[in-house]
Image: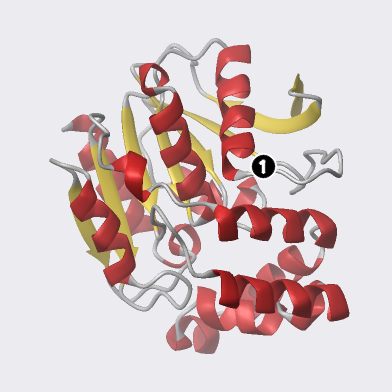
Amino acid sequence: MAFASINGLTVHYELIGNPKAKKLIVFSNALGTDFRIWLPVFDELPDDMAFLLYDSRGHGLTSDPGSPFTIDTLADDLIGLVEHLKLRQPILCGLSVGGLVVQAVAVKRPDLVKKLIVCNSAAKIGDAESWNARIETLRKGGLAAISEATMQRWFTPAFHGERAADIAGYRLMVERQDVASYIRTAEAVRDADYRGQIKDLKIPALFLAADQDGSVAASVVEDTADLVEGSAYEVIENCGHMTPVEQPEQLAALIEDFTRG
């Protein structure tokens, strides 16, 4: 384990491989998870790549000061970590909320980003009504009140049928996050809209969707990809929202192809 002081936070991260490698990928995780969701993908990627995994604000072992924040705040956390580690133009890859975060970094600091990979995410995710309803449920019942519905959105029926132990484990991951931090992150996602800014992006970008995603539909991901001139768009088959867990081989192949292209 490694920790850094960034923007008043204690940030938990893991830097794997040579930080001066020509291909260095930074992974940003989804709401209600920590960086362990990326480990199945890491196992499928070649040894000549380096990787930075980190827990976002209020998730995993990264602290949360307790005040409201925005997606721009989360982007500043990642920018601070990249600069702290003196990483030179990494490839950014984010899932769901992490996908919003890496888009925000690319908009704010394009000089820091070599390429952008956005997984099961968009320039705007959901609407205020649906986010407010989820937040109200959380305030009344905590994370246990939404964990089962979250598993249904995250994983396909086939995954539920074949890997019950994994479903139980990922439900525990969600339930053991800090509920106040989860709510603050949900509020940040609710209020974020990068559609007006992402269309000016000049960085090579790959947008990935999943054909059975119950959180961010493939059509929503495609709408954002259409805003970014020259971007690539692919759909991963037989997969729900948690692509790194359910289809790590497909995801790794697409990442490797894009980073070497």
Q: Is residue 226 left or right of residue 6?
A: left
Q: Based on the displayed image, in which of its 4 quarters is residue 20 positioned? A: top left
Residue drawn at 46 percent across, 68 percent down: 241
From the image, which quarter does the C terminus lie in?
Answer: top left
Residue 56: image location, x then y, percent: 67, 42
Viewer-proximal residue, 238 or 31? 31
In this picture, is 215 found above or below 94?
A: below
Q: Is residue 209 left or right of residue 69?
A: left
In this picture, is 187 found above or below 104?
A: below
Residue drawn at 42 percent across, 34 percent down: 92
Residue drawn at 79 percent across, 42 percent down: 61
Q: Amino acid at mark 1?
A: Ser
Task: Indicate the colouring scheme.
Answer: secondary structure
Using the rendered image of the protein, determine whether residue 216 is visible from the camera's viewpoint.
Answer: yes
Residue 86: image location, x then y, percent: 54, 10
Q: Is residue 249 left or right of residue 72?
A: left
Viewer-proximal residue, 45 or 172? 172
Residue 80: image location, x then y, percent: 62, 21
Q: Based on the displayed image, in which of its 4 quarters is residue 255 positioned? A: top left
Viewer-proximal residue, 112 or 35? 112
In this picture, is 223 found above or below 41?
A: below
Residue 141: image location, x then y, percent: 85, 80
Query: Which residue corresponds to mark 1?
Result: 56
